Image (spheres, rainbow, N blue to C red):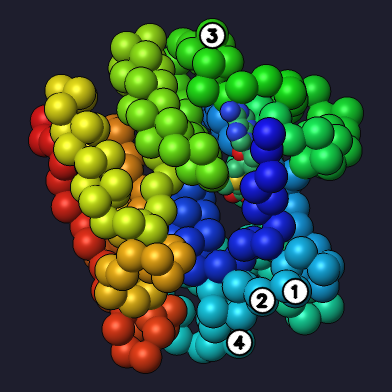
Amino acid sequence: MLSYRHAFHAGNFADVLKHIVLIRILAHLAAKSKPFCCIDTHAGPGQYDLSGAHALKNREFDTGIGRLWNRGDLPPVVAEYRAAVATLNATGELRRYPGSPYFERMWLRRRDRLTLFELHPTDFHALETFAGRDSRISVAREDGFDACVGVLPPAERRGLVMIDPSYEIKTDYRRVVDTLVQAHRRFQTGVHAVWYPVIDRRRANTLERAVENTGIRRVHLFELGARPDATGTGMTASGMIVVNPPWTLRQEMAEALPWLARTLGQHDAGFYRSYELAGE
Ligand code: SAM
C-alpha cells in the first residue's frame, strides 16, 4: 500500500540539494552533441502545486526553495536551479514547484529520451498528463527498481539513472543498492544517482557502507543537513550518491554546499558533507 505523496514535501531542503545535483548532471549530459537517455525510477507527478492542501500542510517549501527565492547572493548552480523553478512561476510569486521529470524534460534536446516510472495511481495519472504527447518521453506504472534494469543499457549509451525512492518501505534501503548494482552492471558508463534521507543516521551509514562494498568505482556523496542528527524527529539531512559524476560536479558543489548549509540550516546548525565513497 503506497501512502507516500511527495506533494507534502515538494521544494523542501532535500529537494533543493537533489534537484541542484540533478540539474548539473543533466547540463553536463546536454553539453555534448550526442543524444542521452534519462531514466527516472521514482518520478512522482512531474510538478507540484505549492498552494494546494498537501504542500500547505507543513509548508516544507518555506525552509527549502522559499529561503532562496528572493535572495541576491546565490552561487551559480543555485541561481541556475532557481531560474529553472522560475520557469513554472511566471508571475514571480512562488506557487508551483517542478518535480524531477520537469527538470529532466527541460534539458532534453530533440533526440534525447526520458523514461519515467511511477507506481502511485494518482501521481501516475498526473505524470501521464505532464508527459502529454511528447514522443521523447515514455511513462510506465511499474516498479521502478525492477523496470529500470530492463531498459538498460539505453541505445544512446549515454545517460542518467535517477533513483529517488521515498524509503516509505524499509526494504527500499536494500533495494536501492541491489538496483544500483544491477543497473551499473548493465550500464557501466552511465551516471547513476541515488537520493537518501537521514532520518536515523545508522540507516544512512549502513546504506553508505553497502554502496562502498559493491565495489563500484567512481562514487561521490553530497549531503546537506538542516540540523544535527537526531532520531525520532524526522529528516535532519539528505544526500545524493552519484556514480560516474561529471568531472565538474565536485567543484561546483564545493562552492554551493557551504552556502546552502548556511542558508537552509536551522538555527545556524546546517552542515554538509562531500566525499569520495570510491575512487577511480
Ligand atoms: N522524483 C520525484 C521528484 O523529485 O519530484 C519525487 C519522488 S518521491 C521521493 C518517490 C515516488 O516514488 C512517489 O511518487 C511514490 O509514489 C513512488 N514510488 C514508490 N515506490 C515505487 C516503486 N517501487 N516504483 C516506482 N515508483 C514508486
Looking at the image, can residue 255 be seen?
no
Q: Horizontally, is 121 left or right of 275 in the view? A: right
Ligand 1 lies under 8 Å from the Cβ of mark 3 = no
Give the CA separation, mark 4 to mark 1.
20 Å
Residue at far left of view: 279
State the SS at label 2: loop
Give the CA separation, mark 2 to mark 4.
17 Å
Disc 3: which residue: 150
Disc 1: which residue: 56
- Between tags 4 and 1, which lies in front? 1
Q: Amino acid at mark 2?
A: Arg
Ligand 1 lies under 8 Å from the Cβ of mark 4 = no
Q: Residues within 10 Å of mark 1 (few under 14, many from 20)?
A: some
**x and y percentages locating residue 122 in the rendered image:** 83, 40
Q: Residues within 10 Å of mark 2 (few under 14, many from 20)?
A: some
Q: Residue at x 83, y 68 (%)?
A: 52
